[in-house]
Amino acid sequence: MNTIKSRIKTCLSQIDNHAKAGQTVDLVACSKGHSIIEIEQAAAAGLHQFAENYVQEALPKITALSPQHIEWHFIGPIQSNKCKEIANHFAWVQTIDREKVAQRLNDQRPASLPPLQVLIQLNLEQEKSKSGVTLDELPQLAETVSRLPRLQWRGLMAIPKQHHNPQAQQHVFKQIHHAFTTLKQRYPQLDTLSIGMSGDFQTAIEHGATMVRIGTAIFGPRR
Ligand SMILES: *Cc1c(COP(=O)(O)O)cnc(C)c1O
């Protein structure tokens, strides 16, 4: 068995072990810094959702892999001049962080494609190095995104800071999950909480993740 295939098997069984009965968790493979051949191997091992952070890096991969019927997620910071390409080539955008970008993605989503599946990125700890809205800004952006007809708003995405103290780490996940369940009371259609990466996906799943984004644990270190 090749390494990518066996790593995927390990990830899937860990996901299974940490999910509660009835909790489905989608595995999105983060392929930035990895080649078309490596993505093909992961697709051959059964994965069909992949994520990229940079439009320039993603487009050649999306074109080359078009026969594979991959669902592509955009997970990088969004520059507004890149909205058109993102709206044309991706099925999901997980990093909506402002109204202007939401409006542009909506306006530029081609009529021939289904609505763009989107998540709002939450930056709970207000880290300057990361995009995303604060808890205070969330309700207003949520209202805007929920009304845009070419976007289908599915939930929240976050990249929580790594805390060495497990209690502090769990506290952040609890707050994110709380924000998600609170929003769901107003928007019952929400079904996606995208938290958890190679280093913390088990904990994220225990705190209600329905989608994990895993790079290193599938592909190994990035070049
Ligand atoms: C790269 C990346 C990941 C995957 O990170 P790993 O630690 O390699 O699993 C997940 N989410 C985002 C937003 C990323 O940029």
Image: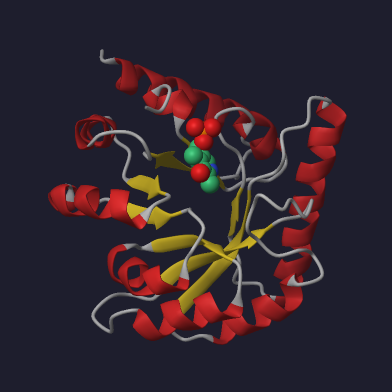
Whole-percent x and y of residue 167? 86, 30
Quadrant assignment for the C terminus: top left
Foreground pick, 38 / 33:
33
Whole-percent x and y of residue 206? 70, 36
Q: Is residue 91 left or right of residue 191?
A: left
Q: Residue, x 46% and y 86% (percent of image)?
A: 149
Q: Residue, x 77% and y 55% (percent of image)?
A: 126
Q: Point out the residue furthest to the top here.
A: 1
Q: How many marks?
A: 0
The quadrant where residue 71 appears: bottom left
Q: In this view, does 185 lie to the left or right of 150?
A: right
Quadrant assignment for the N terminus: top left
* In this view, 53 is above or below 1: below
Q: Residue, x 25% and y 34% (percent of image)?
A: 35
Foreground pick, 94 / 130:
130
In this view of the protein, can residue 200 be seen by the observer? yes
* In this view, 44 is above or below 160: above
Q: In this view, does 165 lie to the left or right of 128?
A: right
Q: Is residue 223 left or right of residue 214?
A: left
